[in-house]
Image (cartoon, helix red, strand yellow):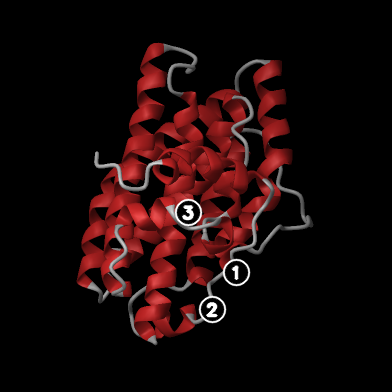
């Protein structure tokens, strides 16, 4: 039973990285300038690499012979558990960077705690990821501050981005069924603790960027139960088309 819950938890965090990587890789060749184009492409590669490790472990834990590729390319959207914010459209660069900042702040806290997991494999993957996410967070935070304190237009674009995606941040802290058992066993951290630290970090970032957080707002949820926005189906159709068309192909 515990292995089943951990398997689903691994899908949740690996799917989030996989779908976000798929999203931001769409910027490759379209970044605002060459250095930034390369930076965002490398961040996408980091996310793909982390998801590969997590999906590989998830497949072994499941014990049904499914590989990382099987889990990535041959599941339908009702079997994906990525956070809703990861599948939201890129929008302009302000929206992409703000979305990235929200996720980076969350993941740095999450993976820092996962590096202490009693599951040695998960802890090792998390420890490696922390080094990468530290860079990701520094990068996205610097851009958010730059937009918030730049021109009138850059601030306007950041405000619009905030209005578009803030309501998806609550979904980051929705646990999967049975996650409490993993917390008690020392495998994963308590999301309530993560949320408190995340809110402090994000509040500080937004204050520095002149964005105010509304006191009350509707928060989307559902990804912990594999319920998604209309965007995920389109992402998967593109991402999975080639391996589904040629399932026996070897790379």
Residue located at (61% from left, 32% from top): 95
Helix, strand or loop under label 1: helix
Q: Quadrant of residue 162?
A: top right
Q: Earlier in the sequence, mark 3 or mark 1?
A: 3
Work out how far the residue at label 1 is from the one at label 2, CA to CA, in angstroms. Answer: 8 Å
Residue located at (33% from left, 80% from top): 186
* Residue 123 position within the rendered picture, expressed as x and y whole percent measured from the top left: 25, 65
Vertical position of residue 36 compared to residue 43: above or below: above
- Image quadrant where one finds the N terminus: bottom left
Q: Residues within 10 Å of mark 3 (few under 14, many from 20)?
A: many
**Which residue has dot 3 on it?**
106
Contact between marks 3 and 1 (CB within 8 A): the answer is no
Question: 142 and 160: which one is in front?
Answer: 160
**Which residue has dot 1 on it?**
225
Residue located at (61% from left, 47% from top): 233
Q: Earlier in the sequence, mark 3 or mark 2?
A: 3
Q: Quadrant of residue 44?
A: top left
Work out how far the residue at label 3 is from the one at label 2, CA to CA, in angstroms. Answer: 20 Å
Helix, strand or loop under label 3: helix
| Numbered mark located on residue 177 in the image | 2
């Amino acid at each position: 039973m515990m292995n089943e819950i951990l398997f689903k938890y691994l899908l949740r965090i690996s799917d989030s990285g996989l779908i976000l990587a798929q999203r931001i890789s769409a910027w490759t060749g379209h970044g605002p300038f060459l250095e930034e184009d390369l930076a965002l492409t490398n961040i996408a590669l980091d996310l793909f690499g982390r998801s590969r490790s997590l999906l590989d472990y998830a497949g072994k834990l499941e014990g049904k012979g499914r590989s990382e590729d099987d889990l990535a390319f041959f599941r339908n959207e009702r079997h994906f558990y990525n956070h809703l914010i990861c599948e939201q459209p890129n929008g302009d660069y302000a929206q992409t960077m703000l979305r990235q900042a929200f996720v980076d702040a969350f993941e740095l806290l999450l993976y820092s705690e996962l590096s202490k997991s009693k599951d040695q494999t998960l802890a090792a993957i998390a420890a490696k990821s922390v080094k990468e996410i530290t860079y990701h967070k520094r990068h996205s935070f610097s851009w958010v501050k730059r937009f918030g304190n730049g021109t009138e237009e850059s601030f306007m674009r950041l405000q619009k981005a905030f209005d578009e995606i803030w309501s998806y941040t609550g979904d980051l802290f929705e646990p999967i069924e049975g996650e409490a058992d993993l917390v008690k066993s020392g495998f994963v951290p308590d999301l309530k603790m993560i949320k408190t630290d995340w809110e402090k970090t994000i509040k500080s970032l937004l204050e520095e960027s002149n964005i105010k957080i509304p006191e009350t707002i509707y928060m989307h949820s559902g990804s912990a139960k594999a319920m998604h926005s209309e965007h995920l189906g389109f992402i998967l159709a593109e991402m999975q088309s080639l391996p589904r068309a040629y399932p026996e192909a070897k790379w």
